[in-house]
Image (cartoon, rainbow, N blue to C red):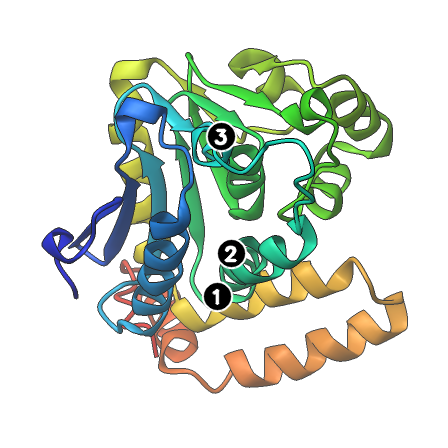
Amino acid sequence: MSTATEFKTIELNCSEGIGTITINRPDVLNAFNDDFSVEFISALKQMSKDAEVRVVVITGAGRAFSSGQDLGDLERKYVPGHVPALGEDLKKRYDPWVKLIRTMDKPVIASVNGVAAGAGCSLALACDIRIASEHAKFIEVFINVGLIPDSGSTWMLPRIIGLGRAMELCMTGRPVKAEEALSMGLANQVVPADELDAATHAMAARLASLPGKALSLTKRLLNESLERSLTDQLQAEAFAQETAGRTKDHFEGVTAFLQKRTPEFVGE
C-alpha cells in the first residue's frame, strides 16, 4: 500500500482490511483540481488491486466532503472568446473514477463529513453506501453555472431516489440537508458529526468481515439489474450463485451454521 507522502491532494490509509482515501484540500473545501484527478484514479486502482483491502472508504479532510470542480483553477481561462472543452475534460478526468468505483469488486463507502456539491455530490452518489454527518449537504449545483449534472449524477441519482425527486434536485440545485437526504434514501445513515468516523468504521468493518466474492457478485448483479430483463437477471443470478457456491467462504458459512459457531471468512 502506498503512503500519503506520495500524494499532494489525498491521503491513503489501510488498516484491518479497510482502505481509506481522504481528499486533502481542506482550504478549498476539497475541490477537485488536475493533480487530484490523477492521484485519485491512481489511489482507486491501488485499492482495487491490493489484496489486503476488502472495503474502500472515501471521505474529506476538514469541514467538507468535496465542493466539486475547483472553479478557482478556471479564472485564467474564462476570458472573452474562451470555449471550454468540457466533454473531453469529463472523459479524461472524471469518468474514469466513476467507472472504477462502480465496477470495483469491493464495496465503496462515502463518509460524507460536510458539503458534497457538484462533482463532489456525484462522487458520493457513485459509492455503494453513503454515511453522512448531521452537517452534510448534497447539492447538484451544476445548474447555477449553466451546466448539467455530470460525473454519473444523471445515471445514479434517479436510481437512488427516483426520477421525480432527481428532476427537482438537478433542475433547482437546492441543497439537501442530512436528515432529508436520509428520508429520501440519498443517505443510508446519518449520525452526529463526532460519531461519523466510528459509524463509518463499524460499517466498513462489518463489510470487511463478510465473504468478499459474494459481496463482489452482489454488487455486480445489483448494478447490472438496472438494465436487464427479469429473465436475463435470473440467468445472471444462477451463474453468479454457481460461482459463489464454489468458494471457501460458502463452505465455511454453511459449516459454521451447522456447527453453531461464528464463521471465519477468508475472502476466497
User: What's the distance in space between the residues labelled 1 and 2, CA to CA?
Assistant: 18 Å
Secondary structure, mark 1, is: loop
Residue type marked 2: Arg
| Residue 140 appears anywhere in the view | no
- Which one is in front, 147 or 129? 147
Crowd tier of the residue under label 2, counting other residues whose Cα lies within 10 Å: few below 14, some 14–19, many 20 or above: many
User: What's the distance in space between the residues labelled 3 and 2, CA to CA?
Assistant: 19 Å
**Marker disc for residue 75:** 3
Q: Earlier in the sequence, mark 3 or mark 2?
A: 3
The image position of residue 133, as x and y in percent, is 39, 19
Q: Quadrant of the C terminus?
A: bottom left
The image position of residue 10, as x and y in percent, is 26, 46
Secondary structure, mark 2, is: helix
Residue type marked 3: Glu
* Rendered position, 58 above or below 46: above
Could you say which quadrant of the image residue 55 lies in?
bottom left
| Residue 227 appears anywhere in the view | yes
* Between marks 1 and 2 in the image, the one whose residue lies nearer the viewer: 2
The image position of residue 13, as x and y in percent, is 18, 51
Q: Residue tagged by mark 2?
A: 93
* Rendered position, 191 above or below 56: above
Q: Is residue 167 left or right of residue 94?
A: right
Q: Quadrant of the N terminus?
A: bottom left
At horizontal 40% and vertical 68% (from top left) the residue drawn is 212
At horizontal 26% and vertical 37% (from top left) the residue drawn is 24
Q: Earlier in the sequence, mark 1 or mark 3?
A: 3
Q: Residue tagged by mark 1?
A: 104
